[in-house]
Amino acid sequence: MTAAETDHFESILARNAATGPAAADETLHDLALDQVFARVGADSPYSSAAFRTPLSDETDVEYRQGVFHALEDARLRAIVETFLSGMGECVRADEETANAHYRYGLELWHLTAVAGYVATVEAFHAGLSETVPQLERSSTGWELLAQHVAAHRSSSGFEALRDEATRLRQRIAALEYNALIRGGKVTIAPFDDEPDLGQSVAATFARFRQGEAGNYSEPVRAGGMDHVQAWMLELVAKLHPEPFAELARFTAASRDYRDAALTSFADEVRFYLVYLDYLAPLRNAGLPVCYPVVSASSKELAATDTWDVVLAPQLVAREQPVITNDLTLTGAERILVISGPNQGGKTTAARTFGQLHYLAGIGCPIPGEKAKVFLCDRVLTVFEREERLDAGKGRLGAEIERLHDVFQTATERTVIVINEAFASTALHDARILTRDVLERISGLDALAVCVTFVDELSRLNDKTVSMVSAVDLTDPAVRTFRLERRRADGLAYARALAAKHGLTLEQIAQRLSDHAEAGTAR
Amino acid sequence: MMVHLVGPDSDFDPEAAEPPFAVDVVQDLQLDYLWDAMADGDAFLRTVARAAMLQPVPTAAGIRYRQAALADCTSHRAALAELYEISVDALSLERGILLMPAKGRPESVLFRAVRMLAGMADQLDKLRTRSAAFAPGFGSPAFRELFAMIARELNDDYMRRLRQRLRELGFTDGLMMSAHVGPAGEVTGQVLRRGRDENRGLFSRIALRRPTFSFTLPERDEAGASALSNLRDRSLGEVANAAAQSVDHVLAFFRVLRAELGFYLACGNLDDALQAIGAPTCIPDPETAASTITTGLYDPCLALRAGQTPVGNDVDLDRSRLLIITGANQGGKSTLLRALGIAQLMMQAGMPAPATAFAAVPVGQLYSHWAREEDEGLSRGKLDEELDRMERIVALIEPGDLLLCNESFASTTEAEGSQIVLEVTAALVHAGVQVRSVTHLYDFAHAVDGDPTLGAVFLRAPRAESGERGYRLEPGPPLRTSYGLDLYDRLFGTDYADAE
């Protein structure tokens, strides 16, 4: 761990500030992860940055995994949600102080903001101090935050703020007065405990009651303050001057009341909430999610029953099954070469490979039963994309340009995802170019997945592994979308299809012999 | 002020959700014919009749309570009609003022409510005067208590107070309220108040404690006027709601009164219709029988439809919870099964029974499981559909309920069907459910016959040729005859059925 590590709370996103370079839009788009993070608003710049920035340290990954894991506890989750809505109301009340152009308006809104803040911190402290020690998996992030909140709460400044705000709120809320409206004239007078007219009416007719009556008091929109109410407020203050004088003194004395670390926490924690919310319906649909073992030293990959985090919600929404795959790289293996029939789940598997590394690298739980993933420095993608068809370079030109960029940036710690490269060239050319690319990747010792129709390249060297999109051999029209780790054999699918139509050699031979028999019988 | 004409401590709600399977029961027992007669063309009475029969009174005491009230109504039909009329008039006020918005700005809600309440006060006056006149002639607990309640609750003192409230809701001295300071300084927590007379000044009608501070909106301050009007509306909400709810309460009272009087009116209609065809009825006995004992029982729906006096059947189940009806087709089996169900529902609605004598133990809920035509659900097998329906009934049925089965599980082979229906029947009967079952499944009937723990009673429909109309069923164990053989015999002139 670096010297930057601290024993006090800095951020729920990391113990130290060190991170790698931000990921390119291109990568996020190709892996479709931009859809996963779409719900992080522009009002949460720290969370946005966290999604875009891979971590470079195993302990930071662990830190975030701990935070994630704890947030899966429904109690902690509820505590955080309550905190966020409380802080949101504070911010709105603060904004109102600037708009309240009437006597006592600014002071009253300020009091609302402070009272809301105080209650929010109190509830947050109570929640954290009860829940954090009981967490199933202890989390440094939550422990440091709980300590920080406890310290802030017991500071003398906060205590004074709390006591004064509470007392003032109660005083003002307790004020009661009478108002008489006759035509355009409004009279304010002391309250004298007069009988309630509505209750009298209700009591008179209650004897007819057979059950619940309807509700006719459609809430009339208050529409906020207006000058009539402002004038009434001034008269009420004349009737009860002392609480309003105290309010003015309080406002002057408590201008800057919010804790900076808690303010940024409200932004940062959205990183976790947005991602968990994204996963929630998928988990409910029965898809496995796990906390990967992330290693900066081992390039082995072992992901069991993993799935495409962006395709899955569409399938779940349509109530279609989500196919899971096992993706593994062991020993010297570095490159998955995927071939097989179209619409067999090849692109999905390649994208999943990229997503796994990216998500694991920003500390997220990932799709799969269990997983061991290399902590890469970045994920680079080469996807055929329409928008690259610019400047008259043509598809092949754009593709080659992109590949060139990739090899400029890629290191031995990079993950490269190549989908259907050279699809627009002749087989002979594609064979050569793809071999070259794969050899470069091998030379770099980077991790990669390459979807290609040149299936013999899966046997290029000891770093390449062949995976084939499979079909159901009893009904070849049914794609299983499941990939199998086996020797690529481009003929298997065609043979299966033929069998379905009764066109294999054996079938034709058999049929002909039947015909022959029928013929001789006749 | 509870009407309680249909139960010592309950009222019925014609709009209440119907019990599950009500639709099946209505269809299987063909209750529509009965309700048509009860309604005599009045859709409201039909609704009331339907609700009363589908919400069976579970106790003998409750049934006796209605029987007594019905007896009162039978001997005072003119008074019944007049009381019914008052409730109908009170409810029609609602239609007269319907043009005004029921919901919306509190000020208009309040205005409408006050007008409605004034109109209803007049109907309440009428109700208490006429009730006082009718009271001496009625003897049932239901009507005695109703008239006493009206005299007690709508006394002179109360009626004076009611009209005083209506005056206060006119706000001639301005709108007076108490209020609090909201978080932003807004007027909040308004409660309209009745001013104290001792606070009224010498020269002012305004009842406020001193000191007072006031302002008057400038003439042309339109924003101010609209803000003030908004404040008035916000403050009137509670009172407008209380007034509108008061309207609801009074309307609800008249609605219940109308529905319950309507039920007895509908019973009178049915009585007229049955008398016209010479069909006898009796006051059923919910107290003495352990199961069902009846003589001259007939299906009133069939009688009303045919317009003639039906053939009655005798059934004596003694203590048995299980009746198995077997025998030839067209032998009146289903008719008897229906008659048993309808009579049970009529008794438990407090109505007369379609028989010369009828005694039965009150049941909780009535369920029916009829073999259905192929029309529903082409996508699923008939057996599947039957099993599904039985599964849903078994999920709801309780000990003390009554299940009528008509040819259940006849849609599969006899061996399979028998096995299924035997297990269902035995389980239900042992659990304390009353079961009446029409069946062609000999295996089933025979197995029941051989199981003394079921204590079944058997009735058998005679074959068509043995009686002229063949509707009278006789006690007797199942015969190994089947509808198929019968039919075959009839068409081919063979003799297989008798050979069995």
Image: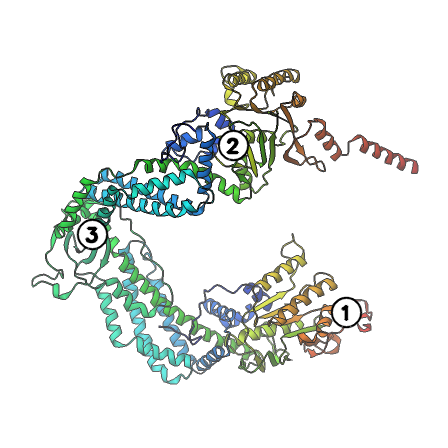
Residue beneath label 1, please? B486
Residue B458 vs residue A14: left or right? right
Q: Of the numbered discs in the image, which one, if any, rests on residue A171? A: 3
Residue at image x 71%, y 60%? B412
Q: Amino acid at mark 3?
A: Arg
In the current view of this chain or complex, which residue is farthest to the left? B202
Residue at image x 63%, y 77%? B320
Residue beneath label 2, please? A294
Q: Quadrant of residue B139?
A: bottom left
Residue B100 vs residue B268: left or right? left
Subunit that carries the residue with mark 3: A
Do callouts 3 and 2 point to residues on the same chain? Answer: yes
Please say whether residue A355 is visible from this viewpoint.
no
Q: Amino acid at mark 1?
A: Asp
Residue A220 screen position, x and y as percent: 29, 51
**How packed is label 2: few (under 14 Cα within 10 Å), some, or many (20 or more)?**
many
Residue A85 vs residue B162: left or right? right
**How packed is label 1: few (under 14 Cα within 10 Å), some, or many (20 or more)?**
many
Point out the tag, 3 or 2, that comes first from the N-terminus.
3
- Report the quarter where the C terminus of chain A lies: top right
Q: Please, what secondary structure does the residue beneath circle 1 have?
A: helix
Please say whether residue B337 is visible from this viewpoint.
yes
Q: Nearer the viewer, residue B469 or B294?
A: B294
Do callouts 1 and 3 point to residues on the same chain? Answer: no
Residue A140 screen position, x and y as percent: 42, 38
Measure the alpha-carbon separation of dots 1 and 2: 81 Å
Is A308 placed above or below A238 here?
Answer: above
Q: Please, what secondary structure does the residue beneath circle 3 have?
A: helix
Which is more foreground, mark 3 or mark 2?
Answer: 2
Q: Of the numbered discs in the image, which one, if any, rests on residue A33? A: none
